[in-house]
Image: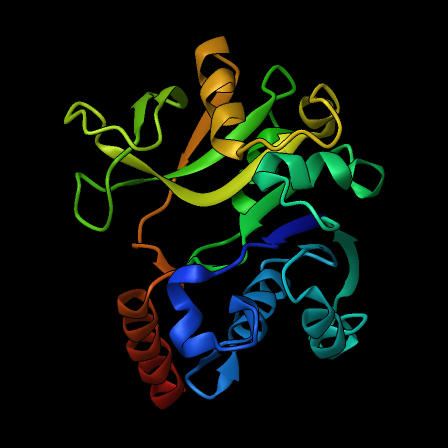
């Protein structure tokens, strides 16, 4: 199984803490954030990871290396000088993508089985993607997803519609053909791809049971620090 981590963002909201480091290398409970993330991915059964990097990506390469320290085989795809957005970064990396793969964000920590969406997609050949979702009801961030049964029927990032009770949890299984259909080197967000798949009726939903965490903001970092510090004490 292959996991793709989108770690090419500028991290402007975290610049005060990150300084001249990418978000992936911000210290969380005594370790670089990417260490925690790769540990969870490996524990979920993945063997291959593709890191899509951009801003200060050379630091991520130097820290993670070939992934051996995490029990993984890690490859890299570089956005180059122009920011391409999350979908654009995947299109740039097309030649390194498996036929089906799991993609997650470089600032998200998800306390669940990362392989779940990919296993679900592989079990349903009629689908083009399986999106992890969480019954958020506006609690942790703005909800953006409507689910009916095992399908995502509507996805609108940035919506304020109270009818959208779920939120994109941050782990999405996709078929490579979805990314191959996109224009090369066009700046595009993955949210537009998810919205189109939802409209097509070919995006499945897999519900997560525990809230998500992220290091995209200082408040999010503090919350994750508390969780992981408590986890270390329990161990």
Q: Nearer the viewer, residue 44 or 74?
A: 74
Q: Position of residue 19 (x, y in %)?
A: 49, 77
45 to the left or right of 12: right
**Residue found 62% across the figure and 43% down from its top:** 102
Q: Nearer the viewer, residue 127 or 196?
A: 196
**Residue found 50% across the figure and 22% down from its top:** 203
Q: How many marks overall?
A: 0
Which residue is outermost to the right? 95
The image shows residue 223, relative to residue 76, as above or below, that is below
Which residue is outermost to the front? 81
Look at the image and tell me in which quarter the C terminus lies: bottom left
Q: Quadrant of residue 82?
A: top right
208 to the left or right of 59: left
Q: Position of residue 197 (x, y in %)?
A: 51, 18
Q: Position of residue 152 (x, y in %)?
A: 39, 22
Q: Quadrant of residue 128?
A: top right
The image shows residue 156, relative to residue 202, as above or below, that is below
Q: Quadrant of residue 60?
A: bottom right
**Residue found 41% across the figure and 84% down from its top:** 29
**Residue found 29% across the figure and 75% down from its top:** 222
């Amino acid at each position: 199984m292959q996991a793709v981590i989108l770690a090419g963002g500028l991290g402007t909201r975290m610049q005060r803490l990150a300084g001249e480091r990418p978000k992936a290398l911000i210290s969380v409970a005594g370790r670089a954030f990417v260490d925690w993330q790769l540990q969870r991915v490996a524990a979920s059964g993945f063997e291959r990871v593709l890191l899509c990097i951009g801003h200060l990506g050379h630091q991520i390469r130097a820290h993670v290396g070939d992934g051996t320290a995490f029990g993984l085989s890690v490859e890299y795809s570089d956005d180059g000088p122009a920011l391409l957005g999350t979908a654009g970064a995947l299109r740039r990396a097309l030649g390194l993508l498996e036929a089906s793969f799991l993609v997650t964000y470089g600032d998200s920590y998800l306390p669940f089985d990362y392989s779940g969406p990919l296993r679900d997609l592989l079990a349903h050949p009629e689908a083009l993607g399986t999106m992890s979702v969480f019954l958020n009801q506006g609690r942790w961030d703005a909800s953006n997803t409507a689910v009916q049964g095992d399908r995502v029927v509507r996805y609108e990032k940035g919506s304020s519609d109270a009818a959208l009770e779920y939120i994109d949890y941050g782990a999405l299984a996709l078929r490579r053909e979805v990314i191959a259909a996109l224009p090369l080197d066009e700046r595009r967000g993955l949210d537009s791809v998810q919205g189109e798949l939802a409209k097509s009726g070919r995006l499945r939903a897999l519900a997560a049971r525990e809230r998500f965490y992220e290091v995209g903001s200082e408040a999010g970092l503090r919350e994750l620090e508390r969780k992981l510090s408590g986890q270390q004490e329990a161990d």
